[in-house]
Image: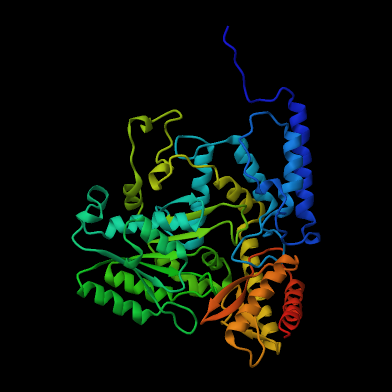
Amino acid sequence: MISETTLDPENWDDVSDVFHQAIDHCIGMMKNVRERPIWRQVPSESTLRQHGNIPTEEHSLNDLFTYFQDSMLPYSNGNTHPRFFGWVHGSGNIAGVMGEMLAAFMNSNVGGRDHAAVYIERQVLDWCKQIFSFPEDSSGVVTTGTSMGTMIALTVARNTHAGGDVQKLGLQGLPARLVGYTSSEAHCSVAKTFDLLGLGQDALRRFPVDEHYRMDIEALKRSIAADRAGGLRPIAVVASAGTVNTGAIDDLCSIADICRDQNIWMHVDGAFGGLAVLAPEYKESLAAIARADSIAFDFHKWMHVPYDAGCVLIKNEAAHRKAFSSRVDYLTSLNDGLAGGEPWFCEYGPELSRGFRALKVWFTIQAYGIQRFADLISQNCRQASYLGELVKCSSNLQLLAEVTMNIVCFRYFIPGVPEDELNELNKTIVTELQTQGIAAPSTTTLAGRTAIRVAITNHRTVTADLDLLVDEVCRLGRTRGCK
């Protein structure tokens, strides 16, 4: 007789009890998030730091949750806390958590076929087209984030404007070298994409920015003209709708005009800032996104969907599908049955196996409505303006960039102290804020000066958090700046 086994538990009631315990504990943690330090370093003696052998024995779910509760949960990166200001991290939401959990229960592969998850992702994409005023017949996919979205979009751009069959012949079979354009403030994922697409990072022309940290439009025009004169083939311009350093918005309308006149693909990196098009005060400056050939953005930033969840939209569905479609015999679709559901999402990106990320997005938007996110985006931007004014009013602080959206870059300043010492002082202040569990900004460098960078993409942040931040920066500056 054949011996058979399964991964299902012997006692489902025990499993239910552990799940309820875990959910109750984690909901309590989110409810009382202000009572915890923002960040704590994993202890040096923690077993998390150890490289052990692969487990061979079984462990109960109860024991595993206890380990998670004690050894992992207290040492997260802290972005659920209202004073997490580092980088650009969304702070999560409880409806999205439910969507994430239920998607795991369904365990759907959304690479294709005819099932509920496919239709939910299509609904989410339809909503995104409405947000950015993209045509109904545009295509798109939910991705891990903007980095993957940029990879997908620029693959389509490369293939569309290569001047030859790059999919069949590769870059070596093309008549001219391909080049693209962005600003020096563009996200590092753009250069990575040029590398991974075989174009090489030198093929990406990165221009200086103006006094507002936006792409220099005249430099863009000159570079395109020089490249064409040199026998090169321009294929794409990557514009930023909210640069990662300062939140600057490139002149999207002028870039759209150039791309139209030059027959060049326009891609918008809207990782966090693109969604500001929902806010009335940014509709005009972001309206030209509707003229782009593609946009990539993140749900896990200003829409607070649990990590990870991004999206890419592409106007030319045929070009998008052609760039990735590879339907072999075992992926043949049928008119009816589970093998239906055309078109399949695996035809719009490199992944055949795709998780049901769209469900947590769907839960988030359904639970709160899109207007709530418009209001929260406006709220964060007002908070950034408020922080900027606090900095301007302080004799010890210097604003290092115009506050254009939700990012504030400033530093603690002592007259007469050399720049290198000021840079080290401000790095120390940020480190102390983090290690003391007070707040978690990040650092960046602007014009050679170290900035305390505060990115407000948190629905839990209130102005009192910003008052505390300024007070603590000044306290640490006075303490650590003393000789």
Tell me if residue 365 can be seen. Answer: yes
Where 69 sits versus 340, above or below?
below
Tell me if residue 333 can be seen. Answer: no
Query: Where is residue 370 drawn, in percent x and y?
Result: 60, 59
Q: Which residue is most to the top?
A: 1
Query: Where is residue 471 drawn, in percent x and y?
Result: 76, 79
The quadrant the N terminus occupies is top right
What residue do we see at 31% from left, 60% from top?
199
Judging depth in this view, the residue of 166 and 362 nearest the camera is: 166
Judging depth in this view, the residue of 271 and 169 nearest the camera is: 169
What residue do we see at 59% from left, 49% from top?
362
Judging depth in this view, the residue of 435 and 345 nearest the camera is: 435
Query: Where is residue 312 drawn, in percent x and y?
Result: 45, 55
Where 48 sits versus 313, above or below?
above
Left or right position of 398 against 20: left
Residue 34, located in which quarter of the rendered image?
bottom right
Left or right position of 169 against 246: left
What residue do we see at 71% from left, 71% from top?
432
Query: Where is residue 430 drawn, in percent x and y?
Result: 67, 72
What residue do we see at 59% from left, 35% from top?
106
Judging depth in this view, the residue of 447 and 83 nearest the camera is: 447
Residue 456, located in which quarter of the rendered image?
bottom right
Left or right position of 338 against 419: left
